[in-house]
Image: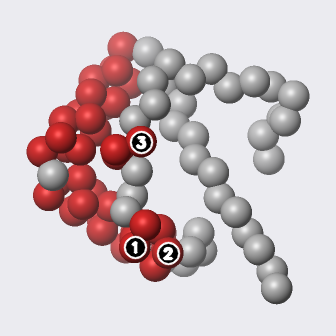
Amino acid sequence: MPDRQQEAVIGEWMKEIAPSPELRQWFGHIQEPFGEFSDRYIGELEEEPERERLAAKINEQALEQQVKLEYAACYRTI
């Protein structure tokens, strides 16, 4: 779990590259189907040229500097 006192430095926000709501709901942040989630997410990126371009940009940046990808998840029990 991240240190809540540590502030995140966001150099760039790429909201457009996030997995679709449908894919996130299907996945449900459960570890078992992560391989299939990854395959489906890559498929989503490849379907849209702008999203694929942003993914390539992240890869290029990672070759030159440390890149940190962050996400948020909410787990609710009812």
Q: CA distance from mark 1 to mark 2?
A: 5 Å
Please state which of residues 48 and 64 is positioned toward the viewer in this rendering: 48
Q: Are marks 1 and 2 in contact (CB under 8 Å)?
A: yes
Asked where in the image residue 36 lies, by quadrant, the reply is: bottom left
| Secondary element at tag 2 | helix
Q: CA distance from mark 3 to mark 2?
A: 17 Å
Please state which of residues 21 and 54 is positioned toward the viewer in this rendering: 21
- The residue under the point 46% across, 31% down is 13
Q: Nearer the N terminus, badge 3 or badge 1?
A: 3
The amino acid type, in three-letter code, at marker 1 is Glu
Residue denoted by label 2: 25
Q: Residue lying farthest top?
A: 64
Residue denoted by label 3: 15
The amino acid type, in three-letter code, at marker 3 is Lys
Q: Are marks 3 and 2 in contact (CB under 8 Å)?
A: no
- The residue under the point 59% across, 69% down is 29
**Is 58 drawn above or below residue 35 in the view shown?**
above
Q: Residues within 10 Å of mark 1 (few under 14, many from 20)?
A: few
| Secondary element at tag 3 | helix
Mark yes or no: residue 35 visible.
no
Q: Residues within 10 Å of mark 3 (few under 14, many from 20)?
A: few
- Horizontal and vertical percent position of residue 54: 26, 35
